Image (spheres, rainbow, N blue to C red):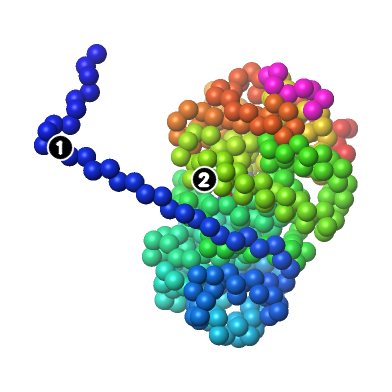
Amino acid sequence: MLEPKRPSAATQVHRQSFAVHYDYPVYFTRDVFDPANLCLRHALARLEGNKRHRVAVFIDEGVALACPRLPSRIARYAEHHADAMAMAGDVVVVPGGEAVKNQHDCVEHMLKDLSARRIDRQSYAIAIGGGAMLDAAGFAAAIFHRGVRHVRCPTTVLAQNDSGVGVKNAINAFGFKNLLGTFAPPFAVINDAAFLETLSERDKRGGLAEGVKVALIRDADFFAWLERNGTALARFDPHGIDELVRRCAGLHMRQIAHGGDPFENGSARPLDFGHWSAHKLETLTRHALRHGEAVAIGIALDARYSVFSGLLPEAEGDRVHRLLVQLGFRLWDDALDLRDERGRRRVLAGLAEFQEHLGGELTVTLIAGLGRGVEVHAMDEALVERAVQWLKTRASPQTLP
Ligand SMILES: NC(=O)c1ccc[n+]([C@@H]2O[C@H](COP(=O)([O-])OP(=O)(O)OC[C@H]3O[C@@H](n4cnc5c(N)ncnc54)[C@H](O)[C@@H]3O)[C@@H](O)[C@H]2O)c1
Ligand SMILES: [Zn+2]
């Protein structure tokens, strides 16, 4: 074999190397726009204390409809703290839900709004909304002036315990979920428990799935806590939800900070346990299935696959399934039965798309115990088939809760 040529004598290589440190607060609070609540004020002023910080505020339409007084409360908050902040124009309402990630003119509108408000790299884009709206607003904030300061106020269980505390954003494109996006840590995150009160039951439940996910890969005690509190969580007991959000957010933050790969340069992505099929199911159902609902199915599928492949004791696999059912998830969708022109289940294409998204070798997280994620580099299609069949049998009306 030919040796690769060394650079010639005329070639010089200068090594460039530096590290960038990220550090952002995640507040857990209530009533963020009560003038007596100082979280936002502190967040804005955490680098330059004696300054009026300019802020552009974007609100998810679903939140604006559920809290019609929110824009006036934000304006009142800004007036009360006028020495520390100034509104750069009125608040802007943007579509919520997956639509905001599918319709690219939403991002363009936000960019125009940032431009019209003369937001610079030391002023702020504040986004208040669900995971989808935060993804789109975060993307706009990350590319405007190559990145302006971004404060997130997540308003769903899922956004507060998972997406909102993380470092990525994305929109969907060309039929693929999250195809366009950046890694861009927020300037601050403010989780306000009061926002969760107006959420639909469906969206409250969706966020529980990410709690089960992170417990299964990282924290057996948290899994046991979920089991003990399953009934209260299924009723959306606010104390239960509050603890779930904090524990789940904490585990996500720990993984990002200490997992060794915050910007996902490697091929593994443990926090995406259950997601290879979930993302595909979301696309196959044209987002009729919400992210959390799809993740619950994805977890059930990969947990059963873990049992069938000999990694997970069956009794533990049964506990995973029982908990998801207890939390009220339907662990089947007919999209699992869709087939391509060659008769192959279309959901299986999710594996190749997952690999392509991460790059490199296929790496899927499975579980070898409750709280113990493990990585595998191949999935046996016959076992996936068995796991899908198993879910289908279990989802028949007789076995629903
Ligand atoms: N960036 C990441 O790391 C990451 C991680 C996980 C998920 N996500 C993304 O998050 C999205 C899902 O987010 P989600 O589960 O928060 O749902 P969502 O953002 O789709 O919101 C669901 C619905 O609830 C409405 N809503 C939001 N807050 C409300 C409130 N307080 N009261 C009433 N209605 C409210 C929205 O308008 C929307 O109609 C998906 O696109 C997923 O890909 C991103
Ligand atoms: Zn997810």
Residue 276 x %, y %: 59, 35
Mark identifier at residue 11: 1
Q: Residue at x 58, y 52 (%)?
A: 166
Q: Quadrant of ligand 2?
A: top right
Residue 12, above or below 72 = above
Instruction: Evaluate if marks 2 and 1 touch, with contact meaning CB atoms under 8 Å apart.
Output: no
> Which residue is at the front of the view, 318 or 111?
318
Q: Position of residue 270 (x, y in %)?
A: 60, 37
How would you rate the neighbour count of disc 1 (Cα within 10 Å): few for under 14, some for 14-19, many for 20 or more?
Answer: few
Assess whether residue 182 is covered by the magenta stretch: no
Q: Residue at x 77, y 28 (%)?
A: 317
Q: Is residue 93 left or right of residue 122?
A: right
**SS assignment at label 1:** loop
Kindly report the distance in space between the C-alpha atoms of the residues bearing marks 2 and 1.
Answer: 34 Å
Give the left or right position of residue 395, taking residue 101 as reference: right
| Secondary structure, magenta segment, majority class | loop
Frontmost residue, 295 versus 30: 30
**Residue 283 seen by the camera:** no
Residue 210 visible within the image: yes
In which quadrant is the C terminus drawn? top right
Q: Which residue is the extreme one toward the top?
A: 1
Residue 237 percent across, percent down from the top left: 85, 56
Residue on which disc 2 sits: 262
Hey, what amino acid is under mark 1?
Thr
Quadrant assignment, res 154: bottom right
| Residue lying at the far left of the rendered structure | 10
Which portion, as a residue range, is magenta? 309-316
